[in-house]
Image: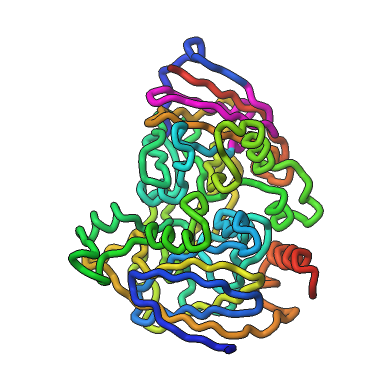
Amino acid sequence: MTEYEDTIPGGRHWSMLIRRGVQLKLTDVSGGGNVGMLMFNPLNYLERLNLPDTLKCQHTFKLTTGHCLYSDMGRVFCSIIDDDVGWHDAASGTCNAHLVANKWGASSYQDDRNDYLRNGRDSFLIELAKYGLGKSDMVANMNWFGRVDVDGAGGMAISDANSKPGDAVILRFEMDTLVIMHTCPHPLDTASAYPRNPIAYQLSLAESVPDDDPCLNSRQENARGFANNQLYLMGV
Amino acid sequence: MLQKSQLSTDTARHIEVVDAGDYWINRVNVGETFRITDLKGNQAVDTLFFNANQPRERYSAFDTIREQKNLYLTTGSTLISDECNPMLEIIADTCGRHDTVGGACAGESNTVRYALEKKTMHSCRDSWMLAINEHEHYGLTKRDLAHNINFFMNVPVTPAGGLTFEDGISEAGKYVEMVAKMDVLVLISNCPQLNNPCNGFDPTPIELAVWS
């Protein structure tokens, strides 16, 4: 099998091992969606997505085409090779049970069955436990499709309607990566009702990285990140 | 917000100078006040906090900024844990702005930021690693090392979503002071970074003080 497509309903979670050379296309089917995501090296779970390093080394607060997502070991988990959105949030963390109950009310499986209001933190904990990981491994996460602006005084405000129906982002994986994800709301979402935006995802084989690749060449830092991957893999 | 302290170091229960490149790991009890002073100016103090009684609970940079809806830390900021409990509150600050999105330096991230041959230079993460392995009784491992505060560092975001590393806004003698809302374990690396113009390529000592 070289291609796979599926859709995760809003407010759910999943995880998967994505191999080097595979690309993941995330599509915000109805617009206004959110994907919380963590990444780990399956050979050494102590190596994990490091968003402060990712932002700092690319001198950016938003993530979009041309950016790479770095591990804490100076290696590139994946590159953003295409993006309809233009701004993905890396600085707001994820929603927890308290936040969801405060915004959208109490909910339980007993009463609401599979429509109960899941939250990002519990979703991550469930998926992490499948690999023997836990809350200590839960560092800063991506919020794909979300945009948070910062004013001159540091004030943070979410942008409504950042992502339109059908908008997609494509991640090309540069090393084997355990991907933990959920489709629970962005923690700063202001919707009056709990948002349930489905996210379609498609896995397929990526083309090999050309010498003029925009992610490899967008910054000297990324050329060095790719060099670290080459050293780790001892291949060309 | 700029706010001076009323406390004198004459009454502190503990006072200590920590050189650049060294770590400091110590307990500060609930209700105690903790001050970090930038003795020479433009130093970065890479700081982590843990619940001293349950170190699986730790400072969470991104929960802290989201809950206060502001990217920068200063007087009035409550530093919260990954379980969204208040750990400390900043009660005095003569610098005015501190970063918590820029993370800490490590040999590996230095290779990306500066040059591949920088990988063996001393770094904040090395100081933290030594601290946790020299103090095994705290039960901390690399898993527990999450995202830190960079006291005295200025990392503004541009309207277009860029991240800039401005010259420090700190000067010799500026300080930040906080009161503990729970028993906390403080883990500091006084940053040894020699490649960053923010500290004028000259990392310098800090002073730490605790009042009961």
The image shows residue A9 at horizontal and vertical percentages of 35, 77
Outermost left residue: A111
The total number of labels drawn is 0
- Image point 51% across, 56% down: which residue? A133
Residue B54 belongs to the span the image colors magenta: no
Q: Depth check: B1 or A108 in front? A: A108
Q: Is residue B125 left or right of residue A13?
A: right
Picture coordinates of residue A110 (x, y %)? 20, 64
Residue B81 vertical position relative to residue A73 in the rendered view, above or below: above
Front one among B160 and B188: B188
For the point 70% across and 38% down, the residue is B192
Q: Position of residue A5 (x, y in %)?
A: 47, 86
Q: Is residue B37 magenta?
A: yes
Is residue B101 shown left or right of residue A10? right
Q: Residue A4 in the image: x percent, y percent?
A: 51, 86
Instruction: Depth check: give the residue in front, A111 or A212.
Output: A111
- Which quadrant would the C terminus of chain A be assigned to in this image? bottom right
Is residue A149 visible to the viewer in this orientation of the structure?
A: no
Residue A105 in view here: yes
The N terminus of chain A, quarter of image: bottom right
Magenta-tinted stretch: B17-45
Of the pair B94 and B205, the residue shown nearer to us? B205
* Left or right of A213 on screen, residue A155: left
Question: Which residue is at a point 65% across and 47% down the rendered structure image?
Answer: B105
Identify the residue shown where x is 50% and y is 26%: B27
